Amino acid sequence: MVVYMTIEIGGTAYTDSVSVEVNKSTSTNNSSSSFTATFENTAGYHKDDFNINDSVVIKADIDDTTPNTTVFNGLVEDIKFEGQGSTKEIIVLTGRDLTARLQDIKIEPEVFNNTETSEIVTDIMDVISDITTTNVDVTETVIEHISFNHLSIFDALKQLADLSGRYFFVDVNNDLNFKQKNNIVSGYIFDNTNVTKSQFRQLDREIANNVWVYGDKILVGVRNSFTADGGSVYDLDYRPHNTNVYVAGSTTPKQGGIFNLVTGDVGSPTQYLVDFDGARAIFVSGTQAGDNIPTSGVDSINIDYERKRQIVKFGIDRVSETSYGRKDKVIVDKNIIDPSAASDRVKQELNDNGSPIIQGTLNVSNIVNIIPGQIVNINLPNSNQININYDVIEVTYKFNTKNNLSNNVVSIKVNRRILEFTDTVKQLILDVKKLQGEETFDSEGLTRLEFATGSFGFRIAEWNVKTRNVGDSFVLGHPVNGKLGSPVVGISGGQVILGSSTAGAFTKVRSGTYLDI
């Protein structure tokens, strides 16, 4: 049997490639699918044939000289010329499939509450026009709360997939697949008849059975109650935020200020001061401030305030701990601002990492169209793999003359990916991005100025639409106010001027909350 392969770049088919390598992955592998193609470039034969962003379509089949099975569909992202003198020159092209779109585009700060997972997926994918969402399956998981702060769409989808027991990838038809793990059986069996080489590794390096998740600090309400004792200082249980003080059963709070920043002067309305670092409320009194101290033994004092409390969740897998010993993992993620999200994260970590990782790498023959995410059966008794079903997490194609003729093109990885140095670097980069995005939710309003004809979309929590007459201001393209000078007059009846000559104040015409257009 012989493997035949074709490669089309920018709409042109090429038959003189030296080698072509394709790596197909899912989110489980934490990467996009990619390709590398090498061409001879003697005397600059291909010097101006390829361009960045050219489309790339690679097809392959067994014993079919005109293959129809697409194994890769993507774009050229890197063109590298290499040479030694003028006798050995090559061009190396590399690129990714449209998963690159998911990695390159960031999500504007956004929050979802009590939303089914697939709805969130389709919502955040709405900004990408060239990837469809036909194969985004409805899940049984309702996300109580999740927020994204300028996170890449890929990393956001990875979070959603982990929380709902899914995986995702962009297929060769440029459609996003969001599928349940361990649910699609390929029907392939790999044994000594079609496996030419195999390797299996099992290790406990990434086991985690005692997991702590630390989220951000949130404000929770506290009330400290006292009976006046004649003093002016009352110690609180915690450092106070947003303090209100009520005396003698009054429902109207006293007027407060900040200790060491505000003083009680004559005529000042300040009746107490908040000492944040000392966790105290101090009633002001004296000749200048007046007597604001509650009556001893008579007045009740209720001090309502908020204190910061960090979100912390802990989980333990007793079975795993008994079998493999205690393995701790601590996660600090300030983008977690809801206890339910922290609980979900703990459950995810225990479910994914409670047992040793097994990773298998197989070189296989007689099969070309293997799709990552599908289940295959492995029956290699000498490797202690007896009729075990594993997920395919990666498929690699190495096309060259030798491999094609020997039908030794495809290799696969199954079950779980062992983390490598590149994964550590990626996590460090992601953590830095999270730190940079921590404060992006603090803005209460986002002002945008947009010039457009037609419609545009926006997703915000609160909105107002106001109008104001342009008066006699010049407006480019306007049928009346688009012309300067006499005898043309503006909407207000005066001469159109180059500048601002608006008439009247802004008038609200519409407002609302939580609009998604």
Image (tube, rainbow, N blue to C red):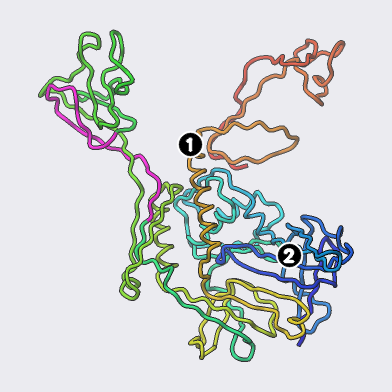
Question: For the magenta stretch, what is the residue range?
Answer: 213-239
Marker disc for residue 159: none
Comes first in the chain, label 2 or label 1: 2
The residue that appears at 35% across and 39% down in the rendered structure is: 219
Q: Which residue is mark 1?
A: 442
Q: Which of the pair 189/92 is nearer the observer?
A: 92
Dot 1 crowding, Cα within 10 Å, few <14, some 14–19, many 20+: few
The residue that appears at 85% across and 13% down in the rendered structure is: 485
Snapshot quadrant of residue 50: bottom right
Q: Is residue 116 left or right of residue 471?
A: left
Q: Which residue is mark 2?
A: 73
Snapshot quadrant of residue 27: bottom right
Q: Where is residue 299 drawn, in percent x and y?
A: 15, 23
Q: Where is residue 59 drawn, in percent x and y?
A: 77, 72
Q: Is residue 232 magenta?
A: yes
Calculate the distance from the C-alpha at mark 2 to the C-alpha at mark 1. 41 Å
Q: Is residue 159 magenta?
A: no
The residue that appears at 79% across and 60% down in the rendered structure is: 81
Q: Where is residue 91 drawn, in percent x and y?
A: 80, 64
Disc 2, SS: strand
Q: Where is residue 464 drawn, in percent x and y?
A: 58, 30
Magenta span: predominant SS is strand
Q: Residue furthest front?
A: 85
Q: Amino acid at mark 2?
A: Asn
Q: Amino acid at mark 1?
A: Asp
